[in-house]
Amino acid sequence: MQKKMGQILIVDDDEDILVAGKLLLKRHFADVQICNQPQQIPQLLSDKSFDAILLDMNFGPGESSGQQGFHWLQQILQLDPQAVVIMITAHGGVDTAVEAMKLGATDFIAKPWQNEKVVATLSSAVQLGQSRREASSLRQTNKLLTSSSISGQVILGQSAAMAAVMSLIQRSAPTDANVLVLGENGTGKELVARELHAQSQRSENVFMAVDLGAVSESLFESELFGHKKGAFTGANEDRVGRLQAAHGGSLFLDEIGNIPLHLQAKLLTVLAQRQVTPLGANAAIDIDVRVIAATNVAKSQLTDESRFRQDLLFRLNTVEITLPPLRQRPEDIQTMAEHYLALYAKKYAKAPMTISSSALLKMQQYSWPGNVRALRHALERAVILADSNELTNKDFQLELTPNQAGEMVSSAVTQPVAVSNSATGEHFNLERIEKDTIEQALKIHRFNISHAAKALGLTRAALYRRMEKYGL
Ligand SMILES: Nc1ncnc2c1ncn2[C@@H]1O[C@H](COP(=O)(O)OP(=O)(O)OP(=O)(O)O)[C@@H](O)[C@H]1O
Ligand SMILES: [Mg+2]
């Protein structure tokens, strides 16, 4: 059986409703609490957070104005602006319920209720509650990331090319223009997307990233647009799509170059109409999002209409920001290296470190096929393994010429990253085999992370995690 989710609170003065509601909802949700005195709401909310709250409009016999419902709704929203509140209203009280929705209630249920309808309404409420919470924690994370240089998330680089990028960000961020970010793997596309959001008028709202490379074709629509329960086999509950969850904020469509043509058409329709219709739903939902898209696919492929719809491209690239590969801006390397050196020395509790001038020169001459991400990893690895406070050439393993980029990885293998393979027979060490396989896939796909991940049957995030783990 599927694991039940959702914390629900029912507040009603009618014991029958509370008992019936609890009995019904317990079967579908993880936790159902009941309360017959609205005065207890503040205490309950301070004890735990609920994904959805069912709130009666009237407390006490003879009450029908709905005033108490309004009062408690406002109290709840003041305590928890993310709360998802569903009003319970007597038959005929629809007008007051609509009034409540204007005040911030999410939906209403009319008494006497139909069990199925209640479960369906609450399932979407729980989903919405969870995405709101996710969104709000993302918001907090975003703030942290943009405000703290300790996270290593500042955009570094004084090269003319990066200065031009920064200026484009500054000029386009405050507008609602869609931005397309282009660049090889690891050049900082996501970093730029987050910066655009941070400098935008939507910065207080969600930054929702969707990795289109990781969404399977069959789940594309459900993931992006959402679905209604029963829309297809396996759709056991309503689901809020990513686009809807991004409402009011920025939607980061990562790896846009990898989606097949027929799905490009669907995406285009939604972006053009600014509305989504969840699978199985009969009404469209308005969405207000600012779209930032990114791809590591070369511009020449994007303008090839047999691969990419040009009308979609025009919708996405009102502003285009191209991040140059690191090898074209060697003047940025010193700043970045010093930044990451300090960051990792601190992280791994090492004394302050320096880089020898010959090692720095070599770094500036190296081709960096994995761009800034690889530079960052190289520094992390060097800091961990270094036996002196000055990092030298031997700490970096960058001996090979640019066009032997793929080989760099295998030279790194022979320098095991403090991972011990000695405990088990070398040939049967699963970690070793996994690492080798990943390296091969990376090489074959010339460090195209999406392709390598696909070949390995992993998501990009899972591949990155393993690359970090093995120091690749
Ligand atoms: N200009 C920069 N200054 C500082 N750090 C950077 C810069 N560019 C990239 N990085 C760092 O490099 C890493 C990769 O950046 P990011 O994930 O934004 O790249 P990407 O272009 O989205 O890569 P991919 O195509 O592989 O998804 C991150 O750790 C990021 O912080
Ligand atoms: Mg990325």
Image: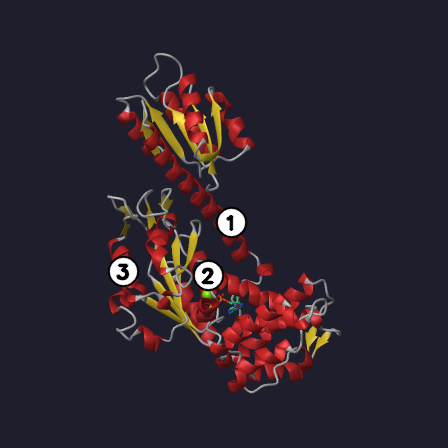
Q: Residue at x 41, y 22 (%)?
A: 20
Say which label, 3 or 2, has the lower sequence index. 2
What amino acid type should be assigned to the residue bearing mark 1? Gln
Question: What mark, if any, has residue 20 been given in the picture?
Answer: none
| Depicted 284 relative to depicted 71: above or below | below
Question: Whole-Å distance between the Cαs marked 1 and 2?
Answer: 15 Å
Q: Nearer the viewer, residue 236 or 192?
A: 236
Dot 3 amino acid type: Leu
Q: Pointer 2: residues within 10 angstroms few (<14), some, or many (20+)?
A: many
The kind of secondary structure element at disc 3 is helix
Query: Which residue shows up at 53% across the image and 65% down it?
Result: 464
Q: CA distance from mark 3 to mark 1?
A: 30 Å
**Camera-side mark, 3 or 1:** 3
Mark 3 to mark 2 CA distance (whole Å): 25 Å
User: Measured along the vertical axis of the image, is residue 393 above or below residue 88?
Assistant: below
Residue under label 2, please give it.
195
x%, y% of residue 109? 33, 28
Q: Secondary structure at mark 1?
A: helix
- Compared to residue 187, the image places residue 44 above or below, namely above
Confirm whether residue 336 shows in the render: no
Q: Residue furthest top?
A: 62
Judge from the rendering whether residue 426 lies leftward or rightward of residue 447; answer left or right: right
Q: Give whichever of 63, 127 is nearer the camera.
A: 127
**Residue labelled with disc 3:** 268
> In the picture, which quadrant includes the C terminus?
bottom right
Tell me residue 115's x, y (percent): 35, 29
From the top left corner, tell me how far across and down residue 216 is, in percent. 38, 60
Question: For mark 1, what is the residue?
Answer: 140
